[in-house]
Image (cartoon, helix red, strand yellow):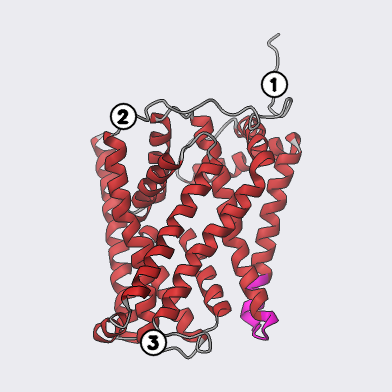
Amino acid sequence: MPTIVRDRRLRKAIQIAISLVLVVLMFWYVLRQFADLSEIWDAMRTLTPIEIAGLVVVSAWNLVTYWIFNMIATPGLTFSQSMVMTESTTAVSNAVPAGGAVGIGLTYSMLGSWGFSKSRSTLSMVVSGIWNNFAKLGMPIVALAILAAQGEPGGGRLVAAVAGLAGLVGAIVVFALILRSEEYARRFGLGAGRWMSALRRLVHKGPVEGWDLALTKFRGRVIGLVRQRWVALTVATIVGHLSLFAVLLITLRDMGVSDDEVGWAQVLATFAFARLLTAIPLTPGGVGIIELALISGITRAGDGEDAAIVASVLIFRLLTYVVPIIFGAITYVYWRRNRSWLNSAPPLPASIAPLPGSEPVAPALP
């Protein structure tokens, strides 16, 4: 056991070291390639108090959209609970290496302390993850279609659009088939289980079992939630992603980067592809990677001043990455100390419950 603990600590230390090296290298490249610190600071100082206040309001609204979305995806969750859960888990996910897994564990802990069962918590996380991934895959396609309509296609962009469209259509088709057919869900679960078992054999671990039954059982619960709230989930997802984009676009405009220098559609395309990079967890919250992708992409897309673009991206990340971590630390402490919400979750609404016959029935024993 001590050896296993040492190995885990060593792996974690290596992850932290790699993340720090990547962040330092990326920021060094940005400062060397685009603008130095004095130019960036001079650009930031051009913001007026009214512009700063406007950015704060837009950034606050962006946070609220996530709270609303999680309320929709988690029936019975109150607005205040959604705020505390969303900010606390986001702070953990963005602050530590491999924070996504830690954030998932914290989500289970918080919802469990409020009386939500593991199945309801899993349902919430899976459905919200599916809708967010659909949005992340769909946004680059929409952005590239807008650029093409404006007469700015480009071979690389068209190839990326076709690949992204294929991925999005494939994901939607698989999801739809799983919801439509219990037999397909069972087969998909078996196939996914075989694939995971093959991966586990590479690291000398045993096979997984029961994925077919687990997926068909879970399918019934997803149907209950999706059939009632798919419109609200879709609208909330779109509003949330566009609100985050609005923070970046307004920051650029406040910093003097006009639409003539860098068009909003070009910013949207860069923003959409930069967000796809977060699927690769090289650094916590994509820090360093996102900044580099946004700065290089927006700079190449137009004729804006490099220092103003770098300053805009850094302000954007300050408002949407650093501030939420600080806020999340406060909400985490509140959760640890607050006892009024313990086991307060209401029963799952009847309108969200699985349809009769949508969950598999275990075979009778002989």
Disc 3 element: helix
Quadrant location, the N terminus: top left
Q: Is residue 153 magenta?
A: yes
Which of the marked residues, 3 or 2, is nearer the chain's N terminus?
A: 3
| Amino acid type, label 1 | Val
* Crowd tier of the residue under label 3, counting other residues whose Cα lies within 10 Å: few below 14, some 14–19, many 20 or above: many
Q: Amino acid at mark 3?
A: Asp
Mark 3–mark 2 CB contact (< 8 Å):
no
Residue at horizontal 67%, vertical 74%?
145
Residue 197 in the image, given as x and y percentages of width and height = 55, 40
Tell which circle, 1 or 2, labels the residue nearer the N-terminal end: 2
Residue 13 on the magenta span: no
Numbered disc in front, either 3 or 1 = 3
* Label of residue 339 in the image: 2
Horizontal side of 346 relative to 210 (left or right) equals left
Which numbered dot is residue 280? none
Q: Could you tell me what secondary structure mostly forms the magenta stretch?
A: helix
Tell me residue 98's x, y (percent). 37, 51
Judge from the rendering whether residue 64 lies leftward or rightward of residue 323; answer left or right. right
State whether residue 82 is above or below residue 13.
above
**Closer to the camera: disc 3 or disc 2?**
2
- Asked if residue 95 shows in the view, the reply is no
- The stretch in magenta equals 148-161
Q: Which mark is residue 306?
A: 3
User: What residue is pinned by disc 1?
Assistant: 361
Alpha carbons under labels 1 and 2: distance apart? 38 Å
- Image coordinates of residue 271 in percent, x first then y, are 50, 71
- Secondary structure beneath dot 1 equals loop
Q: Earlier in the sequence, mark 3 or mark 1?
A: 3
Question: What distance separates the C-alpha of mark 3 from that of mark 2?
Answer: 50 Å
Numbered disc in front, either 1 or 2: 2
